[in-house]
Image (cartoon, rainbow, N blue to C red):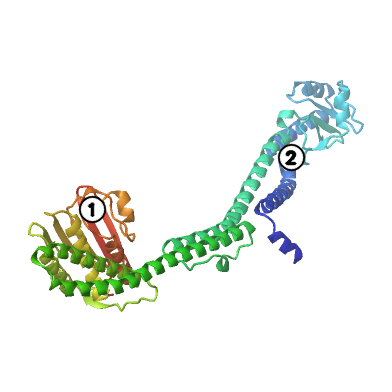
Amino acid sequence: MKITENFDNLAITQKLFFYLSSIFLIIFTLSTIIESMLLDDLLTLPDELQREFKTLAKEAEQYISINDTSGLKVWEKTQKYTLYVVDDNNQSVTNNAIHPYIKSKMSFSHQLHKPMNNRVSKPMIMIHLSSGLHLMVQLPWQLHPAERAKYYLWTVRLCVSAIFLAIVSWLFAKHLQRPLKHLQSISHQLASGNLSVRAPNTLNSNIKEFNDLANDFDHMAGQIEKLVMSHKNLLRNISHELRTPLTRQNLAIHLLKTRLQPEQVKYFLQIEDDANEMNHLIQKILDFSRLDNQNYSVKLQRTLLMPIVTKVINESILQAKSTQEIKLVTQRSDIVALVECDLFAGVLQNALNNALKYAGGSCKIEVNILLDKDQVVIEVSDNGPGLSEVELVQIFEPFYRANNDTTTEIEGYGLGMAIMKYNVEQMNGRITAESILQEGLTIRCYLPTVK
């Protein structure tokens, strides 16, 4: 138990060294076992060569059977192998001269069907003849089985090493991948807005470095959560605090309005417009804070979309300039989705207001409702100047406004698109933006349909 705990506390470099050393020992052991099992078969003469030597033994016996020593002597010299017919004392029966080196090798001769040694040499092969004599054949080194066996053995070593390393590497990679994937999943949750997510409680890794990384991640997530919550609380509190003096100011403005001289009215109207704009901004901030509150909940219900869409379009037409056009493309009036009516109407109204403000004084806006499998798609397209890819990435961020000639001339707070995104997500949907510069912007809202 203590050994296991000490091993778990080792650094990953020490564990890798231990694993690699163990793998090397296991591969070496397996290769040795497999080689010992195959060695005898690999070092045995091939069947074809054994048959050839047995044929030579039969030819020698034919000469011996007719007692033709001179013919046997000539036969020995005409063979492609160095061979001799000898007695039990390794003396040539044909009186052919035997080199002392060859004669010494005869004392260590090998049986025809037995394995050779694993060293490439020119061993003597002994074949017993029926007459009690022996045929000694010197095996050329080119035909020695060890010459062929070394390639087989290297192949076995490579195969064993490759297979075992592949299995162990896969298992080790899975072992490392599990906590990394978990950390990746947690980081994605943090990036999507779940600031309360934490790693160590669910990581369960025995790798010290990963646990340290998870602790650092938790510390970072905690700091980010504090900063974001502080920012939200500060924004919400300031907005609430500003409403009281602004309310008093509006009341004072209305009381003062009746006492103004005609030449003072234009200055008063500017003050009134500024106050109304400040009220509108604060209301937007409070709406955004309300949507961003995790305790905020909606009640989705089966809703026929066409009446809401028609109503919102008619209201937007009244706000549009005479040179601006809003057109409902779809003709289907039976499309139903799971939405909250006020939130859905707010999303469509924001999309149309955004198009009317930024698409230009003579823009054409099209609204379309489509069915796509198990979801409803609401498209709002315009033919305005559009946005760049960089701007599209940030368009749904709070307080973001595109930096171009059109947007700088128009008043706004950068909250409309962020509120649209939160409204759609509250209805279990998603929102996307697609644009080509100088060709317009398309907003798509994907909402769940009724199954």
Q: Is residue 319 visible?
A: yes
Mark 1 is surrounded, within 10 Å at the Cα level, by few (under 14), some (14 to 19) or many (20 or more) other residues, namely: some
Q: Which mark is residue 43?
A: 2
In this rendered view, identify the residue nearer to me: 353 or 312. Answer: 353
Q: Is residue 66 visible?
A: no
Element type where label 1 sits in the image: helix
In this rendered view, identify the residue nearer to me: 126 or 253. Answer: 253
Q: Amino acid at mark 1?
A: Thr
Q: Are marks 1 and 2 in contact (CB under 8 Å)?
A: no
Asked if residue 366 is positioned above or below residue 110 in the image, the reply reads below
Q: Is residue 413 shown left or right of residue 70?
A: left
In this rendered view, identify the residue nearer to me: 41 or 113. Answer: 41
Q: Real-space Cα distance between discs 1 and 2?
A: 87 Å
Question: What residue is pinned by disc 1?
Answer: 407
Q: Quadrant of residue 428?
A: bottom left
Number of marks drawn: 2
Element type where label 2 sits in the image: loop
Q: Position of residue 348 (x, y in %)?
A: 21, 67
Q: Earlier in the sequence, mark 1 or mark 2?
A: 2
Q: Amino acid at mark 2?
A: Leu
Q: Quadrant of residue 47?
A: top right
Q: Position of residue 330 (x, y in %)?
A: 15, 65
For the N terminus, the image quarter is: bottom right
Q: Quadrant of residue 308?
A: bottom left
Asked if residue 79 is positioned above or below residue 116 in the image, the reply reads above
Asked if residue 412 is positioned above or below residue 340 in the image, the reply reads above
For the C terminus, the image quarter is: bottom left
Q: Residue at x 68, y 35 (%)?
A: 148
